[in-house]
Structures are given as structure tokens and as C-alpha cells.
Amino acid sequence: MAAWHFDLWLIPIDQTLPLATLKDFRAPPLPRESLTIAKDRLNAALPPMRPLASRWTIYGDPDASMIELYAEESHTEVWARIDARQDSDRFCMVLCDLAGALACQLYLAEADQVIEPRRRHLHMALMQSSAWTFALDPVAYLDGRR
């Protein structure tokens, strides 16, 4: 994860959150049928890359903002990465729409924070993140002035 990356996991609305750190957090599984819903939504909204493996697909741009789907036989995991250096308004809209369709909320492990899947809430969390701080002024961020 680069300094300008803002990572989120989609977690079920009724999920009890574990204590987490960026190093060891693993997203709670979503039902297996979430994969079909997610693929349908994302195929219509973002360019899919070729699957990296039979169970792992990325939508968007791996060098910018992207959504990853990982499918096990019994469940699905979904996470997203926003590149704070780029305009991500449309991407945030797609992400919030996907979360709503899957009855999920967004989890930001960096702040151990749950974010309601609304663009305004997501933008506020992004603007408070270390990724945003870096994107605004990389030199000051690296010098510890921000």
C-alpha cells in the first residue's frame, strides 16, 4: 500500500467488527451470492481486468482506484483502493452503489472506522486520511510537517 492509497473493505451491515490493525485485518466474508451481484454491478460501471486467478478479479485501474473481488467456495470478499492523487468522484459513486447493493458498509482499517456508503461520508473520510494528506503535499507529508 502506497502513501496515497486509501483502502476500504465492504463488510455486512450487521457485522460485529473485530479489533483490527492494517497488518492483520481480514474482511468478514460476504455470502457467496454477493459475487454475482458485484460482478453485474461492476461490469456495467468499471472496466474489468482479466481475472488474476480463477477466484480473484480486479475492476478499475490497478495503478489508480480499483475494486477487488475474491471468491471462495463458501463466501466472497470485496475491498477497494482509492488513489487520493486522482479525481475519484465517479469511482466513489460506484463503490457506494456496490456497497448498497450488497447490504454492506465500508470499513476503513486505518482509522478502525465504519463509513456509511454515501459519497459525502466517503469523501469526508478520504479527506481526513493520511492518503489525502500525502496527495495534497507529498514533501510536507514525508518531512512530517503534515
Image (tube, rainbow, N blue to C red):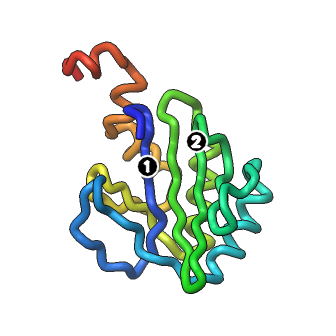
Q: Is residue 34 above or below residue 94?
A: below
Q: Amino acid at mark 1?
A: Asp
Q: Amino acid at mark 2?
A: Ser
User: Between 53 and 7, which is closer to the camera in this rendering?
Assistant: 53
Instruction: Report the quarter where the C terminus lies.
Output: top left
Q: Is residue 18 left or right of residue 3?
A: left
- Residue at left offset 29%, top offset 54%: 23
User: Between 52 and 130, which is closer to the camera in this rendering?
Assistant: 52
Secondary structure beneath label 1? strand
- Residue at left offset 47%, top offset 33%: 84
- Residue at left offset 63%, top offset 62%: 56
Q: Is residue 91 above or below residue 141?
A: below
- Residue at left offset 36%, top offset 18%: 137
Q: Is residue 138 above or below residue 101?
A: above
- In the rendered image, residue 94, in percent from the top left (x then y), is placed at 64, 54
Farthest residue, direction front: 53
Q: Name the quadrant containing residue 62.
A: top right
Q: How many marks?
A: 2
**Disc 2 designates what residue?**
65
Q: Counting residues from the N terminus, which is met first, the one under dot 2 or under dot 1?
A: 1
**Disc 1 designates what residue?**
7
Instruction: Report the quarter where the N terminus lies.
Output: top left
Q: Is residue 90 left or right of residue 105?
A: right
Residue density around tag 2, few if under 14, some if 14–19, many if 20 or more, within 10 Å: many
Residue density around tag 1, few if under 14, some if 14–19, many if 20 or more, within 10 Å: many
- In the rendered image, residue 136, in percent from the top left (x then y), is placed at 40, 22
Farthest residue, direction right: 44
Q: Name the quadrant containing residue 14.
A: bottom left
- In the rendered image, residue 129, in percent from the top left (x then y), is placed at 33, 39
- In the rendered image, residue 73, in percent from the top left (x then y), is placed at 60, 83
